[in-house]
C-alpha cells in the first residue's frame, strides 16, 4: 500500500506556536483582529472634552483663581503704593489673563526710576512686581533741585535734596563749538564713564566731577585734592597711574594723569 503523500503529511503536522500562548493559532480560523471598540473611543473623547472644559472654567470662570492682591518687592525710593498705582494690575481679573509684558512696559514708562521689573503670577490669587531701581552715581544741579544720573548716563529723577555720598557733576563747557562736537548728553555719559573707571578708594573720595570739554575732565577729592584726568580715553591706564602716584606721593594735592605714560604730582 502506498504511504501518505507529502501534502497529507504536511496537513497532519501541528501548527507551531510560541510557548505559553493560548487561544486559536495565529492565522487560524478562530483568529480575530484586535481593535478598540468604538464605545471605548467615544468615552475617552468625552472624558477629555469634559476635563478640558473644566480646566478652562477653573482658569477663566472660577472665582477662586482671580487677582486679589499685588505684592511689590525691591522698592526703596519708590513706595509699593506708587508701583501698584503705575502698574494698574486688573484686580478681580483671572490670574491667567494678566498681561505681564504690558504691565512691565507700563511701569518702565511711568516710573523712570525703575531700571528693570519682573511681573509674575503668584498662584492662586496674586501678582508679584519685582522691581530693581536705578542708582545715582552722579548728581547734576538744576536750579534749586538735583538730577540723578545712573551708571548708563540716564537722568532718571529730579529731587529736592542731593543724595548723600553721590559725586556731583559740574558741566562748564567752554564755547558752542565744543558743544556742537560733543553735546551735553554725550559729556554726561563720558563723566559717568570716568566715574566708573576710578579706583574704588578714589571713587569713594570723589566729591565733584568737573567737565569743561571732552578733553578736560577733573576730579575734586576730599582733603582738598585734585585729579586732572583729561579725556575719557585710556581710563584703565590712568587709573593705574593714579594709584601709583597716590601711593608714591601720599602728601601731594594735585595729580595729573591726563598723559598716563608721564603722570605728575605736586603739592599745589
Image: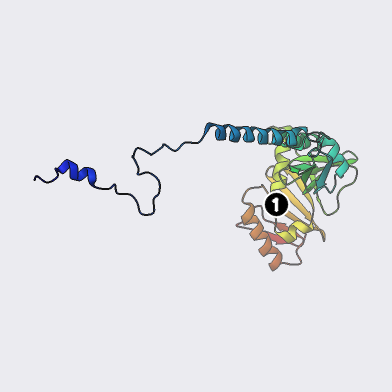
Closer to us: 63 or 111 = 63
Q: Position of residue 153 (x, y in %)?
A: 73, 42
Q: Which quadrant would the N terminus be assigned to in this image? A: top left
Q: Position of residue 27 (x, y in %)?
A: 33, 39
In this rendering, position of residue 256 left or right of residue 8: right
In this rendering, position of residue 90 left or right of residue 264: right
Q: Residue at x 74, y 59 (%)?
A: 202
Q: Position of residue 130 (x, y in %)?
A: 77, 46
In this rendering, position of residue 5 left or right of residue 252: left
Q: Is 24 rendered above or below residue 105? A: below
Q: Is residue 99 visible?
A: no
Q: Secondary structure at mark 1?
A: helix
Q: Residue at x 71, y 42 (%)?
A: 189
Count of marks placed on residues:
1
Q: Residue at x 77, y 61 (%)?
A: 253
Closer to us: 151 or 225 = 151
Q: Position of residue 114 (x, y in %)?
A: 78, 42
Q: Residues within 10 Å of mark 1 (few under 14, many from 20)?
A: some
Where is residue 146, by image quadrant? top right
Please say which color scheme the image uses: rainbow
Look at mark 1 in the image and give the residue it sits on. Answer: 196
Q: Which quadrant would the C terminus be assigned to in this image? A: bottom right
Q: Is 173 rendered above or below residue 13? A: above
Closer to us: 255 or 44 = 44
Where is residue 80, by image quadrant? top right
Q: Is residue 214 visible?
A: yes
Where is residue 214, by image quadrant? top right
Farthest residue, direction front: 1
Amino acid at each position: 500500500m502506498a504511504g501518505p503523500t507529502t501534502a497529507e503529511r504536511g496537513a497532519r503536522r501541528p501548527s507551531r506556536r510560541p510557548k505559553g500562548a493560548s487561544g486559536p493559532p495565529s492565522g487560524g480560523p478562530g483568529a480575530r483582529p484586535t481593535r478598540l471598540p468604538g464605545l471605548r473611543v467615544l468615552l475617552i473623547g468625552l472624558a477629555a472634552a469634559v476635563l478640558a472644559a473644566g480646566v478652562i472654567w477653573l482658569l477663566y470662570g472660577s472665582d477662586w483663581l482671580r487677582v486679589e492682591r499685588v505684592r511689590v518687592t525691591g522698592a526703596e525710593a519708590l513706595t509699593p503704593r506708587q508701583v501698584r498705582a503705575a502698574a494698574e494690575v486688573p484686580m478681580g481679573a483671572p490670574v491667567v489673563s494678566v498681561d505681564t509684558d504690558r504691565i512691565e512696559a507700563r511701569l518702565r514708562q511711568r516710573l523712570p526710576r525703575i531700571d528693570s521689573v519682573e511681573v509674575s503670577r503668584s498662584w492662586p490669587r496674586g501678582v508679584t512686581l519685582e522691581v530693581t531701581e536705578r542708582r545715582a552715581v552722579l548728581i547734576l544741579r538744576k536750579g534749586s533741585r538735583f538730577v540723578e544720573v545712573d551708571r548708563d548716563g540716564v537722568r532718571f529723577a529730579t529731587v529736592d535734596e542731593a543724595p548723600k555720598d553721590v559725586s556731583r557733576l559740574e558741566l562748564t563747557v567752554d564755547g558752542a563749538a565744543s558743544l556742537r562736537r560733543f553735546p551735553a548728553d554725550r559729556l554726561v555719559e563720558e563723566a559717568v564713564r570716568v566715574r566708573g573707571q576710578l579706583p574704588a578708594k578714589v571713587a569713594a573720595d570723589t566729591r565733584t566731577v568737573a567737565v569743561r570739554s571732552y578733553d578736560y575732565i577733573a576730579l575734586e577729592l576730599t582733603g582738598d585734592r585734585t585729579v586732572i584726568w583729561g579725556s575719557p580715553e585710556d581710563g584703565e591706564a590712568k587709573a593705574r597711574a593714579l594709584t601709583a602716584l597716590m601711593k608714591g606721593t601720599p602728601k601731594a594735592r594735585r595729580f595729573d594723569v591726563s598723559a598716563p605714560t608721564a603722570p605728575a604730582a605736586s603739592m599745589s
